[in-house]
Image (cartoon, helix red, strand yellow):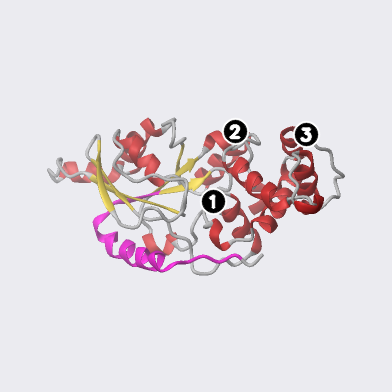
Amino acid sequence: MDIQWYPGHMAKTRRLMTESLKLIDAVCEIVDARIPEVSRNPDLDELTRGKPRIILLSRIDQAQPEETAKWVAYFRKKGNAVLEINAKTGQGVDKFPSAIKSLMADKIKKQNEKGMTGRGIRVMVAGIPNVGKSSFINKVIGKKRAIASDRPGVTRGQQWFSVQGGIELLDTPGILWPKLDDEKTGLYLAFTGAIKDDILDTETLAAKLMDSLKTRCPGAIRDRYKIDFDPDADGFSILTLAAKRRGFLISGGEIDTERMGKILLDEFRGGKLGRITLESPEDYE
């Protein structure tokens, strides 16, 4: 599948982020703990031009804890501050203000030495669509002010929010990059809902997801859909077995794999197949 999605508002967001760089002190990059590397926008390094950065691993409740621990170590080894969060429940969010102050300790010290004790720390919150930026902001400020949704492309403009301890957050719309260079990247982003379903062939995407799940966690498929399959079976065959097991038939007795595909994607994104991480740091070493 050749998956590409870069609507006009993303190009506008890129320009606005560039213009806002002079206003910010640090970058908070939120990534999906199920796909920590794939969900990092490679353009962000260029856009933020070396600003101090903290990486927030979001959706940790849906990722495998042992894999998340590996990713935390991986990112820290590369010199990044890292925090694990569940933006919906607020788990780990309370550690954010102290983590930012630790990240910016040198700058805060210099400001204090110059008598600039009242100046706050301004942080840009960035990430791909549907990764949980607005949910995180709502939890960290303690109010439902940022628009949160399980659909990509909801936040369209930049907004400033104040956090305890003199921290200000700049919320930015989720952006992808103009060209997704390989199939795996496009698929993983589509699996997790970072790309609008409207532009996708759901049945084919679901078959590709079955292929990935078969490799990473075949037991999750067997347990959820009460089916057994040959280890060499392809994703579409497994999707067909699941549809048949659920009794999804259309006129003429044909198996409704499209309906099963939509359910598979919804249940994966909703965590109903269990805690699943689709990539490991070892994949990049």
Disc 3, SS: loop
Disc 2, SS: helix
Does 141 lie within the magenta span?
no
The answer to whether mark 3 and mark 1 are in CB contact below 8 A is no
Label 2, label 3: how far apart the Cα atoms are: 25 Å
- Crowd around label 1: few <14 · some 14–19 · many ≥20 (10 Å): some
User: Residue 251 location in percent, x, y?
Assistant: 76, 52
Q: Which residue is mark 1?
A: 193
- Crowd around label 2: few <14 · some 14–19 · many ≥20 (10 Å): some
Q: Which residue is mark 2?
A: 65
Q: Which residue is mark 3?
A: 226
Label 3, label 1: how far apart the Cα atoms are: 25 Å
Q: In the image, which residues are magenta?
A: 3-28
- Amino acid carrying label 2: it is Pro
- Crowd around label 3: few <14 · some 14–19 · many ≥20 (10 Å): few
Q: Disc 2 vs disc 1: which is toward the camera? A: 1
Which numbered disc, 3 or 1, marks the residue that appears first in the sequence?
Answer: 1
